[in-house]
Amino acid sequence: MLETTSSAEYELIQRCQQGSLKYQEQLYKQFYGYAMGIGLRYCDTRDDALEVVNDAFIKVFNTINTFNLDKSFKAWIRRIIINTAIDRRRKDLKYQLHTDMEYASHIGHNHTAIQQLNAKDILKLMDGLPALQRAIFNLYEIDGYNHDEIAVMLNIPASSSRVYLSRAKEKLRKALTHIAQGHE
């Protein structure tokens, strides 16, 4: 079922489109928790997530006149938050050491163990992943982007996206196995 904008959201968005700061504040408060949940999945710290959320809301308010009221506002704002987080990641990646992934060997994984991961376990363990692996895992497994789309977003080869996803899954599987064996 395709989610559309509710009548209460419709009025709130219309008021924001008219430039009302009061309604912009209400919109911010109404969607802050939702936005922060997305930001925390993509950022290393709560402060980074807050910065992404605030930057995303600035983009929302600057472009709210382009929002189609017949569409889902949650989906629209979600995409802005994800893109803002990815833009921040891209900016941060300039200052990190890169390894040429074309020369990396393929890392296999145990499909059975990966299939046994549930969402609660994954979210709890994701904090232990390196930032790029966590971002790719989120984009692919949770938000449904394919490797070609991820490659464009992160400015990396699609093959690197596949390798990073594989490594993230392997680390999550090992961490879950470690916990299951009582080595928390």
Image (spheres, rainbow, N blue to C red):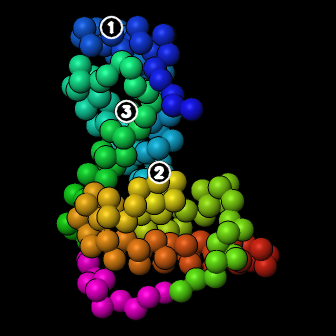
Q: Where residue 61 is drawn, which disc sits there?
A: none
Task: Identify the amino acid type marked 1.
Answer: Arg
The residue drawn where x is 37% and y is 71% is 161
Disc 1 and disc 2: Cα gap in Å?
Answer: 30 Å
Q: Is residue 28 left or right of residue 182?
A: left
Residue bearing mark 3: 76
Q: Earlier in the sequence, mark 1 or mark 3?
A: 1
Find numbered disc 1 in the image and state the secondary structure of the residue it sits on: helix
Pointer 3 and pointer 2: residues touching (CB < 8 Å)? no
Name the magenta segment's main secondary structure: loop
Residue bearing mark 1: 15
Q: Is residue 27 on the magenta stretch?
A: no
Find numbered disc 2 in the image and state the secondary structure of the residue it sits on: loop
Q: Position of residue 68 (x, y in %)?
A: 31, 22
Classify 30 as above or below 100. Answer: above
Q: Where residue 143 is drawn, which disc sits there?
A: 2
Crowdedness of circle 2 by 10 Å Cα count: few (<14), some, many (20+)?
Answer: some
The residue drawn where x is 25% and y is 60% is 152
Pointer 1 and pointer 2: residues touching (CB < 8 Å)? no
Look at the image and give the residue range highlighted in magenta. Answer: 97-107
Of tags 1 and 2, the one toward the viewer is: 2
- Look at the image and tell me whether residue 139 can be seen: no
Q: Earlier in the sequence, mark 1 or mark 2?
A: 1
- Which of 168 and 88 lies nearest the eye of the viewer? 168
Quarter placement of the C terminus: bottom right
Q: Position of residue 154 (x, y in %)?
A: 28, 61
